[in-house]
Amino acid sequence: RAAILDTAACHKDRTISKRAIEYIHDIITALLVEQSELPHFHFNEALLKPFENLLSMDSCDVDVQDQIVGCLYEIVEAHRTEIRSGWRPLFGTLRTARNRPVHLSNIIDIFHVFLETDNTLVFANAGLDCILCLLSYLEISGSGGSVAGATGGGGGSDGANEDNNIRSSDFLYDALKFLERCSSILSFMFNMPQCPNLHSTYKIKGITYTHIIDANIPNSMENFTYFGQDYLQSSNEQYMISYRSLHIDKETITKIDELDKPSGVLKVWFLLLDGLTNSLIVCPIAHQSPILQSIFKLFKSLLANPGIEFGFYCINHLLIPMIQDWLRYVNKAQKNWALIEKNFKHCCCMTTDLVVEFIEKSQTTLEERIVIGSEQSYESQKHQQAIKKSKFTSIVRPVDNLKYSKLRKMGSVDEQPQPAQFSSYYTKKEEEVPSATKIPTAAILALKQLLLVLIECSAQSQETIARVGVSCMKHIIFSTGHIFNEDQWMVITSAIHRASTVTMAPLRQLIFAFNENSNSFYGDCANVKVAARRDSTLDELQRVHSLAQQVFLMDNQRDMINSKLNNNVGGGLNGVNGAGT
């Protein structure tokens, strides 16, 4: 009978298809009323599956889709407590129907009813499906409201488009609110003494999500030589500078399985944040700001619950790599930075503040744990050391500078014992400088990754993006530098050196065209000209002219060339030539 009704629901005759949908609705309603699903059974999941199957068929027309969504709303409104396992195919149906969100008010009510359910078993069974459904709506909400697409033609459809954009914007805020509600439910379940296993986590059981940033800058003019290379090679007192302190060791990265509980609640939480951060790149520009607010609201809440370990894991493998992916996506797609730079700058600054806050909190938390450990009895300390040798390694590690390495041979001190549950998060070293600051390895990973991303930002041709990269690096140094020891400062100085090398590489290429104390106007080894695009604005021309003066002219030469600015602006392709310095 089910196969007959499915076939009839896709019939070309609207009368037949409408009646078939009504029959399916009546059957579901009757079974929900007459019998209650027992715990750990999934009869209702099979009961509501036909609606999901119908919407996945290509032969299902628009009117049938609208009728099915209306039927789902009626079922939820009348039998919200009896659906139970039927929520999973229900959200699957809504995901399939997301391309035609004509019943936004009904869809909002369905999510509201589910998230206000007091039964944690219901959320454990269908919570992942609810989250994935909400994230799928973020991808299409306001697809017509993109700033880039706002230049379309007018006509009678303008009013309808504006109405759709308003409704989509309203639904965006509702979807973000529902995702925040899902996060709070997961937070509550994480603290439950016996958290129920979340259904469908077997699909993501093998997740070892350790996405880290790429340290190589694409299309960079950097030639990987060191400052003053000739002098360094001829001097025995100087040593080559290496970027090994910025190296990321993938083998020491904590896996999510080491942090998660058997229920899989952290994996679902991680997927929620993963979908939210990924939607930021592809969503309409008008929706980036509210999504950014939700992202950082959820990331900041991780500090309180489930804790700083999971917070650093999400920062290292979601937030910081997302910034790099966003930056490269804009450059690869050749999108207009003028429309995106405000939100991108805001994201970089907020991420920097978040990492600084987490680093400071991680040191405070560790100091408190050390004090607690020092108050334990001698027998308890011996017992903990006998159970498991902690991986507690201080951040003082070997470096390439030979002089600097000699400073490492200092007296060692006894290690403070740590609770066993934190042994997978902090590392321990056999020999340790007494004044060394203990910072989690996850915090060092966040510091390295953020610095590498900011270096890539500083190497961008877009001046505003380059400036925000430098400003964020400065903020990190001034805010957290007082808690760093030699090894962390080696990371900082290596990052500054690399940023200087990358950003000055184009300038060095230009300077190489001139000999020392050259009087040549166009260059000794090459013909140097600075050209502006024909479509450049007046402000852009003036900025290029000013930068060319700073690079190629002496102070006493700038006044002479300024008088020619007005004559050069009128031409199409404006050349600004410079003398060697």
Image: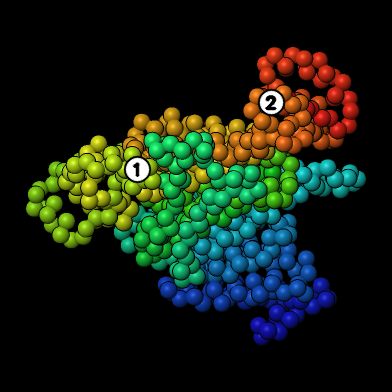
Q: For this rendering, which residue is in front, 554 or 444? A: 554
Q: For this rendering, which residue is in front, 376 or 59? A: 376
Q: Which mark is residue 402?
A: 1
- Pointer 2: residues within 10 angstroms few (<14), some, or many (20+)? few
Q: Earlier in the sequence, mark 2 or mark 1?
A: 1
Q: Type of residue at label 2?
A: Ser
Q: Type of residue at label 1?
A: Leu
Left or right: 377 in relation to 561: left
Q: Secondary structure at mark 1?
A: helix
- Count of numbered marks: 2
Quarter of the view holding residue 72: bottom right
Q: Secondary structure at mark 2?
A: loop
Whether 55 is drawn above or below 141: the answer is: below
Q: Residue at x 29, y 46 (%)?
A: 394
Q: Which mark is residue 518?
A: 2
Task: Please state, as top left, top right, bottom left or bottom right, where the N terminus lies in the image.
Answer: bottom right
Q: Spot the residue most to the front.
A: 234
Residue 219 rendering spot, x and y as whole percentages: 65, 48
